[in-house]
Amino acid sequence: MNPKKRKEDEEDNSDIKESFQNKINESEAADINASNSGSSECGNSTDQQKSDNGGSSEQPGTSEKVSDEQQPNDAANQSSDQREKKHIRLEGSKTAGVLLFCGGTNWDLIGRKELPKNAKGAVGRNLWGPHRMTSLQGVRVTAVFSGSCAVHSVIIIEGGQAMTWGRNDKGQLGHCDNKRRDIPTIVETLKDHNIISAACGRAHTLFLSERGIVYATGDNKMGQCGIGSQNTAINIPTKVSFKGRSITKVACGAEFSVIVDVKGGMYSFGCPEYGQLGHNSDGRYFVTSNKLSFRCELIPRRIIAFIEKTREGHVSLVDDVQITGVACGVNHTVAVDAKKRCYSFGFGGYGRLGHSDPKDEMVPRLIKAFDGPRNVRGVKKVFAGGTYSMAINELDVLFFWGQNKRAGEATMYPKPVQDLVGWQVRDVGCSNCSIVCVADESVISWGPSPTYGELGYGESRPNLLQLPKK
């Protein structure tokens, strides 16, 4: 990094560091007690695990590693509110339907110039239009998950069973091996769990059960599986080392993960390189005089400070933040709270953070663009692609910032997607560059070349489109 630029960044962050340290001193002890208060409320406690496992506390891949700070205190610290949460059950999607699939199916080659040495040849073709999967005939799907840099997918079927397929070189499919799966396959080790949600990173996966317990599998070289160690990879779903409240949301970046508890507390773990963990640090340190490394978070650590910056650079803390939604790009995170305020942090290139500049943010920073004119209103949902972010406001208007094409100017702050103004946008799916959204009763997609058919236009239609099209 340019020494001059690094010096400027350090000066800009001086106010943040002071406010951040004050926040730590005020709330650290209370946070530990509230978030890690023992098995009466803990979503990842042994008691909850027994219930979620159908009565058995023994299972492959269970991790109970926690730091001394996270050991639960005595029963006197357990509030009545925490005891009430003991039997919490989260609900997944109540709707189900038929899965339609389009895009690339050569899992070993997608995103690569050539096949790796251990691959067994190029298998799988591009599906240019939506297809039904024969193996899922008669199966009702309630939810589908992938990621902006993932080459694997997760679906949840009726009954709460998780199925995965795609690339599996790091064990991210959770099948206790590293064999690619070309059709959706049930994750047998989670068969006795009612899975309601999931998230996919570049080569790791998080599964969330109805009990608020998180299981991780796949690449763990940066601690992104949150099991308390930095293994090369784990190929069996393993319980994340977390003793706090039940988890309700999960999200994955390339090599980091974010989870949200039932009280709106947000926790992160994995690679901190660009500040995407939100702990006011990029984790850099020198192993030797010329070798740089990163101090990764190996277990979930709570993000305790949220800030607001003025144009003059003045920094102030934002109070009463309860996170209700979160999304991760390759190296950035976007979140929305109960007051419909939107925050972003991590890598700032191409304006993907929405702060009108390309600087990295080490702490969640309020996006001021949504705090402006009345026609903007608050944010309901957030989404993240590889180098861009999106949000739906209270008027169901879709906003975009960042860049999803390889040339041209980036959008440095949230702007409405003009071609969808007047549409009621309900949901969005973001890949590295391509975008698919559900608006009114239509499915609309767009993205730059090259694509693998994920836009779903069919073989006789163009395989790229810069503007939204049904």
Image (cartoon, rainbow, N blue to C red):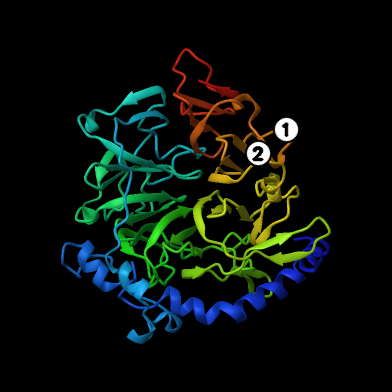
- Mark 2 near mark 1, Cβ–Cβ under 8 Å? yes
Q: Amino acid at mark 2?
A: Gln
Q: Nearer the viewer, residue 5 or 84?
A: 84
Q: Amino acid at mark 1?
A: Gly
According to the picture, the residue beneath numbered tag 1 turns out to be: 408
Q: Is residue 161 left or right of residue 379?
A: left
**Residue shown at the point (50%, 70%) measured from the top left:** 301
When asked about the image quadrant of residue 54, the answer is bottom left
Picture coordinates of residue 426, whole percent (x, y) = 48, 34
Residue 246, compared with residue 367, is above or below; it is below
Q: Is residue 185 left or right of residue 198?
A: left
Picture coordinates of residue 161, whole percent (x, y) = 24, 47
Picture coordinates of residue 172, whole percent (x, y) = 36, 52
Picture coordinates of residue 288, whole percent (x, y) = 64, 75
Estimate the spatial distance between the alpha carbons at disc 2 and disc 1, rounded to whole Å: 9 Å
For the N terminus, the quadrant is bottom right
According to the picture, the residue beneath numbered tag 2 turns out to be: 403
